[in-house]
Amino acid sequence: MASINFIGGEKGGVGKSVTARVLAQYFIDKNVAFTGFDTDRSHFSFNRFYTDYASPIVVDSYEGMDQIVAVFEDNPQANVIVDLAAQTSSPLAKWIKDASLIELFKEMGVTVNLWHVMDDGRDAVDLLGRLVDTYGNGPNYVVVQNYGRGNDFVLLRESYALQKAQAHGAHVIELPRLHDASMRKIDQHNTSFWKAINDRESADSLGLLERQRVKAWLKNCYEVFDRLPV
């Protein structure tokens, strides 16, 4: 199955790049080839952690974004992850609309997944409603309740935005929280999740229980991803 996964949420700090990194590691561990793109010029964290798989692009440039579709021209069975920066929904929607990309991907047999990564705030809920209003019934919606950025998603569960998303068959998932200290160490040293689990020798390595926590956390994430059309 070919797929393109836009990892968004529009807000900054909700965990979009972490979600992209987990999906990348999921593909790697499942031996699924993929190409990654990082649109966040403020830190390019996806590209930084997975240099061999992801490259930076400029989201407000058609020439930059066109590189994504070029992947499928060379390999119709490709899988793509696009880590979207905050406040990129408008240029992305214009790019998609101007080329009727949802329809094109459908003709090509490429599954389009729009990931909406959320904290537990009201604005994240409102942005979900805006996302569904923009794209309607074309793509798959993956609503990510990120427990690393919130602990009570009652606003989402009671929202009209969620009802609209579910009316279009949205997948609503929970991304579990990784222990804060372990995540900070991983981020400070630009460590991939594979290295976090397997590195025992370097000065940046995690302790035994920290490695075990990351391993258990990834396993839980993978069980969630196994149910998605990725």
Image (tube, rainbow, N blue to C red):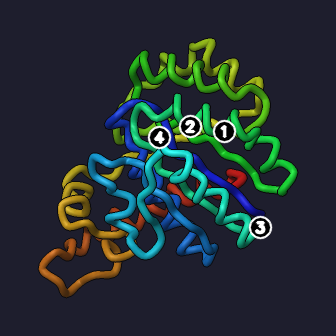
- Residue 123 vs residue 163, the one in the foreground: 123
- Residue 20 vs residue 151, the one in the foreground: 20
| Secondary structure under the numbered disc 2 in the rendered image | helix
Image depth: mark 3 or mark 1 in front: 1
Could you tell whether 35 is left or right of 203 in the image? right
Q: CA distance from mark 4 to mark 3?
A: 25 Å
* Residue 198 vertical position relative to residue 12 in the rendered view, above or below: below
State the image coordinates of residue 150 (x, y, percent, origin top left). Answer: 36, 31
Name the residue beneath numbered marker 2.
92
Residue type of the residue flagged with mark 3 = Pro
The mark found on residue 60 in the picture is: 4
Residue type of the residue flagged with mark 4 = Asp
Q: Residue furthest right?
A: 107
Image depth: mark 2 or mark 4 in front: 4
| Secondary structure under the numbered disc 4 in the rendered image | loop
State the image coordinates of residue 27 (x, y, percent, origin top left). Answer: 57, 68
Tell me which numbered mark, 4 or 3, is placed earlier along the sequence: 4
Tell me which numbered mark, 1 or 4, is placed earlier along the sequence: 4
Name the residue beneath numbered marker 3.
76
Q: CA distance from mark 2 to mark 4?
A: 8 Å
Q: Residue at x 50, y 39 (%)?
A: 8
Could you tell whether 33 is left or right of 147 in the image? right
